[in-house]
Amino acid sequence: MMTLDEFQPLMEAFWDRLDQEADQSKDSQLALNQLQSTYASLDLGEQELAQQVLIAWVESGDSHRRFAALAMIDRLGLRSALPALRRLGEVYEHSEGPSAPYDWAKVNRIIGRLTET
């Protein structure tokens, strides 16, 4: 079985390729759908590693990876991401950026869906 240190660069390269292809085809959902499909084909150990990578991406400086992480966490219902989501929500809450209120609302909607059940 792969370690997180081995798995993370592979997943990042895979996402970067998917993201570039989706950008070229002007289909933002293409990359997310392919990432979700690939995630579903992983064995449980690999899925656990992928979840750890997605959680790390939540707090990444790379907005494309953060976007993918938030979407995948929401789609997959990854409750293990709640601490990272709460930290990101705090960052947005205190941010002065023009998109901060929208980003804060998005993160809090995901937190709400994850904590409903």
Image (cartoon, grey):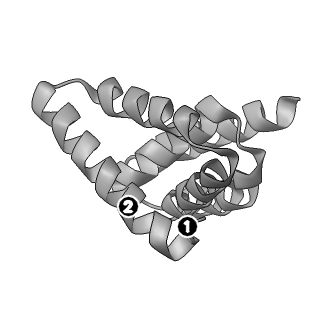
Foreground label between 1 and 2 = 1
**Label 2 sits on what residue type?**
Leu
Q: Are marks 1 and 2 in contact (CB under 8 Å)?
A: yes
* Residue 24: image location, x then y, percent: 11, 33
Q: Quadrant of the C terminus?
A: top right
Q: Under tag 1, what secondary structure?
A: loop
- Tag 1: Cα neighbours inside 10 Å, few (<14), some, or many (≥20)? few
Judging depth in this view, the residue of 17 and 106 nearest the camera is 17
- Image: 100 above or below 9: above
Q: Quadrant of residue 79?
A: top right
CA gap, disc 1 and disc 2: 11 Å
Mark positioned earlier in the residue sequence (1 or 2): 1
Total labels drawn: 2
Q: Quadrant of the N terminus?
A: bottom right
- Residue farthest to the left? 24
- Tag 2: Cα neighbours inside 10 Å, few (<14), some, or many (≥20)? few
Q: Determine the residue positioned at 39% across, 53% down.
A: 65
Say which residue label 2 marks: 10
**Label 1 sits on what residue type?**
Met
Judging depth in this view, the residue of 87 and 16 nearest the camera is 16
Q: Determine the residue positioned at 60% across, 59% down.
A: 49
Q: Is residue 115 left or right of residue 33?
A: right
Q: Determine the residue positioned at 66% across, 63% down.
A: 87
Judging depth in this view, the residue of 43 and 105 nearest the camera is 43
* Residue 90: image location, x then y, percent: 64, 61
Q: Is residue 81 left or right of residue 97?
A: right
* Residue 88: image location, x then y, percent: 59, 59
Say which residue label 1 marks: 2
Q: Is residue 113 left or right of residue 72?
A: right
